[in-house]
Image (tube, helix red, strand yellow):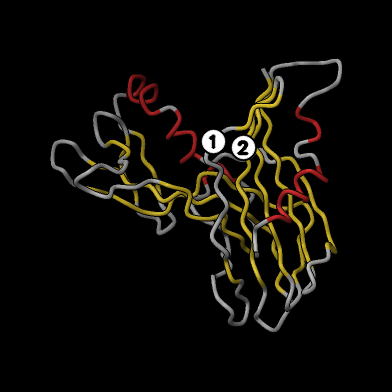
């Protein structure tokens, strides 16, 4: 389970190590993917870390909807994991948040893991071969993600860490080769009061070295996003 061991992992690895140089305070944005594999007794048997640099078209569209609309006079198209599209911009739909009348929520659904790969992550709207949540053959048990309540400030650095753990009770070894952040997004049309919703892949990484998770083992995945001022 995600708990006190998370603090140990984060402190031990100092994620990300390259976020700040001792004598060089360049403004920068860093995203780091870290994976820890533990045996049935909780002992760390593998540590893995790589640079993460693959925001999807969905992510970029959510960041720049107004700019895109002003340039091309069209709303940005978001594609969810079911390959269903939605239009997004203040002239088309708005992101919905909870209010006192309706529970319109937008949140991180999970860090999805898979056993495939894709050569162009920008166009990805789902993992190539998602690993299902469960204890059956080829499945992993997804523990709910650990989402920070705020951004941590440490000197010139601001960062937040999203993590999730997975237990292998399938009876066999499962290989993870791709990872993605899934956002549950709700969009509402203010004119028609229509609500569109779905799981949206916003960040995607193919591992340079696939991770094998044996039966009875646990894997924990951390995404660290940091900015240096």
Q: Residues within 10 Å of mark 2 (few under 14, many from 20)?
A: some
What secondary structure is marked by label 2? strand
1 vs 2, front mark = 1
Task: Kindly give the residue lying farthest to the front in the view shown.
Answer: 4
Residue 77, image quadrant: top left
In the image, is 210 to the left or to the right of 178? right
Horizontal and vertical percent for residue 209?
79, 56
What secondary structure is marked by label 1? loop
Looking at the figure, which quarter contains the C terminus?
Answer: top right
Picture layout, residue 9 above or below residue 137:
above
Residue displayed at 60% across by 46% down: 162
Residue displayed at 83% across by 62% down: 44
Q: Nearer the viewer, residue 121 or 89?
A: 89
Task: Kindly give the residue lying farthest to the left in the view shown.
Answer: 192
Residue displayed at 66% across by 38% down: 53
Residue at the disc numbered 1: 150
In the image, is 162 to the left or to the right of 47? left
Return the mark for residue 160. Answer: 2
Residue displayed at 44% across by 56% down: 81
Q: Nearer the viewer, residue 225 or 57?
A: 225
Q: Residues within 10 Å of mark 1 (few under 14, many from 20)?
A: few
């Amino acid at each position: 389970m995600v708990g006190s061991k998370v603090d140990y992992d984060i402190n031990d690895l100092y994620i990300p190590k390259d976020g700040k140089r001792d004598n060089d305070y360049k403004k920068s944005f860093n995203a780091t993917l870290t994976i820890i594999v533990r045996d049935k007794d909780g002992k760390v048997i593998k540590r893995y870390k790589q640079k993460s640099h693959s925001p999807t078209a969905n992510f970029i569209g959510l960041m720049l909807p107004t700019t895109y609309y002003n340039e091309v006079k069209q709303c940005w198209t978001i594609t969810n994991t079911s390959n269903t599209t939605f239009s997004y911009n203040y002239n088309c739909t708005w992101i919905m948040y909870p209010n006192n009348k309706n529970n319109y929520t937008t949140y991180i659904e999970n860090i999805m893991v898979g056993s495939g790969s894709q050569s162009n992550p920008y166009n990805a709207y789902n993992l190539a071969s998602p690993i299902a949540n469960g204890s059956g053959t080829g499945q992993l048990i997804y523990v709910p993600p650990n989402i920070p309540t705020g951004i941590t400030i440490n000197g010139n650095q601001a960062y937040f860490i999203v993590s999730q753990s997975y237990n292998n009770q399938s009876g066999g070894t499962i290989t993870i080769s791709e990872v993605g952040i899934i956002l549950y997004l709700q969009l509402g049309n203010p004119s028609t009061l229509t609500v569109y919703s779905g799981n949206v892949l916003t960040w995607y990484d193919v591992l340079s070295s696939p991770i094998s998770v044996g039966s009875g083992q646990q894997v924990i995945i951390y995404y660290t996003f940091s900015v240096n001022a």
